[in-house]
Image (cartoon, rainbow, N blue to C red):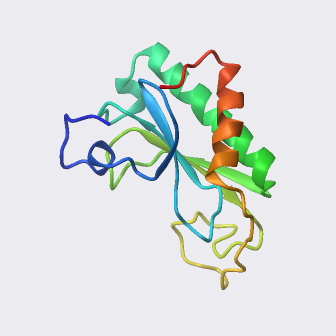
Amino acid sequence: MSPSAPSCELCSTPGGEVLWQSARCRVVRVDDADYPGFCRVIWNRHVREMTDLAADERQELMVVVFAVESVVRALFSPDKINLASLGNMTPHVHWHIIPRWQTDKHFPLPIWGMPQRCAKGVSLAISNQEMINALKEALATTEMEEK
């Protein structure tokens, strides 16, 4: 986490349960019972926009985002994956990897939209350790070192 922007939530807190981290970024699991497997990939240094990153940094970040997407798909078998990088409320580069099901309470709208139905409570008991192991395996093939 970066000490450069103390008012930034992603600089002052992990942003979720840390599953994996490198010197440049981290993967956290978001505690949201309606969206099991919801993860964020957060750039450690406080940067507002993707284009503020050097080309190699952008590449590294997206390698991690795609690895997380692959892991979430393999473990949770969602109907769809949403990738989002908004940062309107938290202007710190981060990506959301959100598994979606046709029965979730917001589908087909974004999870930040108006609920379309009562939550059906997708029940998938995938532990953080299972996710950590899968992330380590997926990221090992990218030559990214865990710290």
Residue 54 at x, y percent in the picture: 40, 16
Apparent side of residue 51 relative to residue 39 in the rendered image (left or right):
left
The structure residue drawn at horizontal position 53% and vertical position 70%, both measured from the top left corner, is: 113
Nearer-the-camera pick, 69 or 145: 145
Query: Which residue is rendered at x = 38% and y = 47% of the image?
Result: 14
Identify which residue is drawn at 72% across, 80% down: 120
Residue 110 percent across, percent down from the top left: 59, 63
Number of labelled discs?
Answer: 0
Q: Is residue 81 above or below residue 138?
A: below
Q: Residue furthest front?
A: 129
Q: Locate the N terminus by quadrant.
A: top left
Residue 93 position within the rendered picture, expressed as x and y whole percent measured from the top left: 39, 38
Q: Residue at x 45, y 31 (%)?
A: 25
Is the residue 53 above or below the residue 118 in the image?
above
Image position of 48 (left or right of 81): left
Placement of 5 over or under 117, stated as above or below: above
Q: Nearer the viewer, residue 95 or 18?
A: 18
Where is residue 58 drawn, in percent x and y? 48, 23
